[in-house]
Image (tube, rainbow, N blue to C red):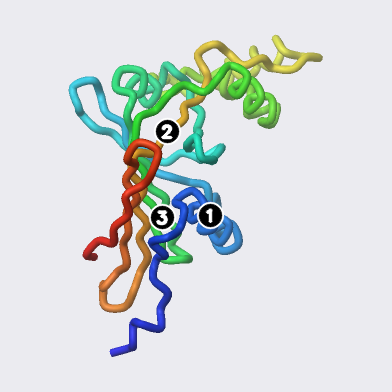
């Protein structure tokens, strides 16, 4: 059996946002596609959960930002029950990070700035799509795309009122990394007012 003491453990004295940034940077160098991909779990007002993959679009000490159609299933659940859980899994690094906490809307300025940064076709697609709602035929969506493209010919597509973002404010962040024989390394940071309580967990 290999000597596991040769493998570095998750440093309990680390700042969780700094550790997240460090792991994300390593994922950007090793993951073949979308290192910022994350699963997000939301729930209805009565607590029925759902989960899907989305992309992280901002991270700092205020929290973790993502964008959506507010009338999608995800958007509706977040407005009705403003709590969520995120999961990053980087297979190439054999690492995971779980993040849980309440969500809050981003500012109008943040949403406008991010929407403007997207490609023109992505903005047109966001305007044309009734995200998550039934679509009778793909041709209907493609026709909408043509209509929106014509509407904004010669001008920049404007962010629709039903499209914006949320910031998850972390109350708990758990870091996990693989070790031999499923003797994995786990550590969790739990927010306590203006500080974090840190503990290592059994695998």
Q: Is residue 40 above or below residue 10?
A: above
Tag 1, which secondary structure? helix
- Neighbourhood count class around disc 1 (C-alpha, 10 Å): few under 14, some 14–19, many 20 upward: some
**In the image, residue 162 lies at what x, y percent?**
50, 13
Of 150 and 15, the residue lying toward us: 15
Q: Nearer the viewer, mark 3 or mark 2?
A: 2
Left or right of 151? Residue 12 is: left
Tag 2, which secondary structure? strand
Left or right of 58? Residue 105 is: left
Q: Answer whether residue 75 is visible to the viewer in this image.
A: yes
Q: Which residue is mark 1?
A: 24
Q: Is residue 3 above or below residue 75?
A: below
**In the image, residue 56 lies at what x, y percent?**
51, 40
- Residue 1 lies in quadrant: bottom left
Q: Which residue appears at 48% of the width and 37% of the height?
A: 64
Of 76 and 172, the residue lying toward us: 172
């Amino acid at each position: 059996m290999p000597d596991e003491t040769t493998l570095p453990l998750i440093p309990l004295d680390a700042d969780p946002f700094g550790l997240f940034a460090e792991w994300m940077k390593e994922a950007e160098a090793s993951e073949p596609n979308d290192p910022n991909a994350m699963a997000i779990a939301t729930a209805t007002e009565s607590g029925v959960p759902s989960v899907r993959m989305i992309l992280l679009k901002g991270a700092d000490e205020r929290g973790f930002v993502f964008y959506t159609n507010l009338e999608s299933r995800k958007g509706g659940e977040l407005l009705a029950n403003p709590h969520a859980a995120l999961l990053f899994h980087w297979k190439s690094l054999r690492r995971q990070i779980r993040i849980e906490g309440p969500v809050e809307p981003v500012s109008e300025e943040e949403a406008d700035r991010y929407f403007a940064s997207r490609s023109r076709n992505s903005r047109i697609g966001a305007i044309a799509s009734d995200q998550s709602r039934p679509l009778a035929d793909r041709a209907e969506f493609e026709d909408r795309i043509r209509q929106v493209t014509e509407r904004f010919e010669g001008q920049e597509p404007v962010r629709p009122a039903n499209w914006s973002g949320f910031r998850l404010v972390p109350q708990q962040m758990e870091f996990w990394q693989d070790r031999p024989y499923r003797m994995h390394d786990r550590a969790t940071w739990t927010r306590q007012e203006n500080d974090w309580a840190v503990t290592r967990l059994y695998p």
